[in-house]
Amino acid sequence: MGCFSCFKPSPSEDPFEVETAIVKEVSWYEAHIQEAERLALVIQEAEQLDWAIQESEQQQQEEEENDEQLPPPPPPLKEHNNISSRAPLDEDDEERIIRDSSKETKPSEDEVIPPRSMCGGCHFEIEQGGSVDVLGVPWHPECFSCGACHNPISIENHVSNSRGKFHRACYERYCYVCKEKKMKNYHKHPFWEERYCPAHETDGTHKCFSCERLEPRGTNFVMLDDGRWLCLECMSSAVMDTDEVQPLHFEIREFFHDLNMKVEKEFPLLLVEKQALNKAEEEEKIDNQHGVVTRGICLSEEQIVTNVSKGPKMGPNKQLIGLTTESQRVVSEFEVTAILILYGLPRLLTGYILAHEMMHAYLRLNGYRNLNNVLEEGICQVLGHMWLESQTYATIDAAAASYSSSSQPPGGANASKKGEWSEFEKKLVEFCKNEIETDESAVYGEGFRKVNHMVTNSNLYETLQEILRRRG
């Protein structure tokens, strides 16, 4: 083939006609090449087919020659009713049959084996067709039964709570404390909505210091060294000593920073027993006439405080052992010497109390002195409620993890580091918020509602600045 890019037409020829002739010549050449390749492929396929036919005929001929050399087959055996006409198998045949049968029963790699259904009650496997579906979860029919009468429950007519599942009629008259099935009168917790015999409020039934639920018969609440009782759910996330509370301390400080209310000064945060907290309250000369239980204090006086340096561990018979305390003097050159909080409270309740007391510290350190008591306590309750609200966004799931920082209240990202929450902890957040919102006391309850109304159209920092401006 020539080099067409080097061809130069004579001046007397039309350039367009020359170019057209070149294109035609190239097209003709390429067409002949393609035709030649096609013919070569057809010839190759024909040769391969002819070779395959010859080999097949040769193999068939060899088989016929071998058959001619074999002796004639034996005459057929006479069949009897109890004698098999099949020849006995040798060892090789038996191994082959066993191998082939195992191949037939073994599932293929592509075969999808359906997952086994597990009962939502006993967590054992459910046989096919032997279950009831409850909100997408399969149950054995016998497991989905009433906690009062123990008979099966219909899906449409039952009540479910943290204590179990009940027929609606049984639940109306069932005491979750003593298991009495036919209460004539009952009391009901305003938040948990658990019903119980009125006598249990005065008969010595233990009450959880944290969530306020009564101890059901057959369960064991845990008694702390200072005489307080905790249910096992609250105990599972309890903060037990001063070292253990420090990560929460840093988290609360960062929460204040995110609100543009950074607490500049450093001072101790100590966990203490009830007796030490009451002693500090007396020395601080705090006039507690509001009918509330003291769970934390922001100190402004120098004191010797006995704090829990090493929390107790669970021992035999669910008894706490090994609590260690040590005394230290708290001093400071400014208006805050320390914050004290009761040990042994769940992380959520400890965090709320710490946020409340840290707000007292912020007010003292930033010139908000001699505020009206209702106003100051209201401000601290609002701040504590805001922190609890941030924890609502910290329940870890795929949706919460994907929230942008602009859609989370301050502190939500830090709280999410805690890990997956239990269902009880999610409920405990709402319980703590409800306690603040429904508080009927003249100082804490009214103070919260007044300040909460003030910050409806602004933020807490702007509200404090307005209060300071008016006082100036």
Image: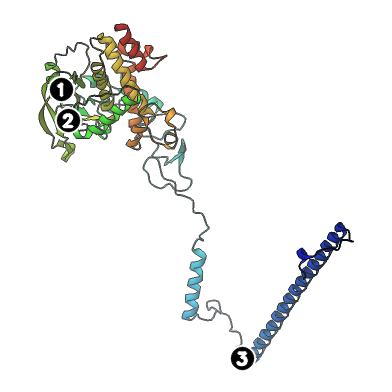
Q: Amino acid at mark 2?
A: Leu
- Residue beneath disc 2: 224
Visible residue check, residue 117: yes
**SS class, disc 2:** loop
Q: Position of residue 248 (x, y in %)?
A: 27, 31
Q: Name which residue lies at 19% across and 34% down.
A: 243
Visible residue check, residue 147: no
Q: Name which residue lies at 65% across and 88% down.
A: 62
- Residue beneath disc 3: 70
**SS class, disc 1:** loop
Q: Amino acid at mark 3?
A: Leu
Which is nearer the eye, 192 or 205?
192
Placement of the C terminus among the 4 image quadrants: top left
Badge 1 or badge 2: first in the primary sequence: 2
- Tell me the quarter of the picture where residue 447 sits: top left
Q: Residue furthest right?
A: 12
Q: Position of residue 111 (x, y in %)?
A: 52, 57
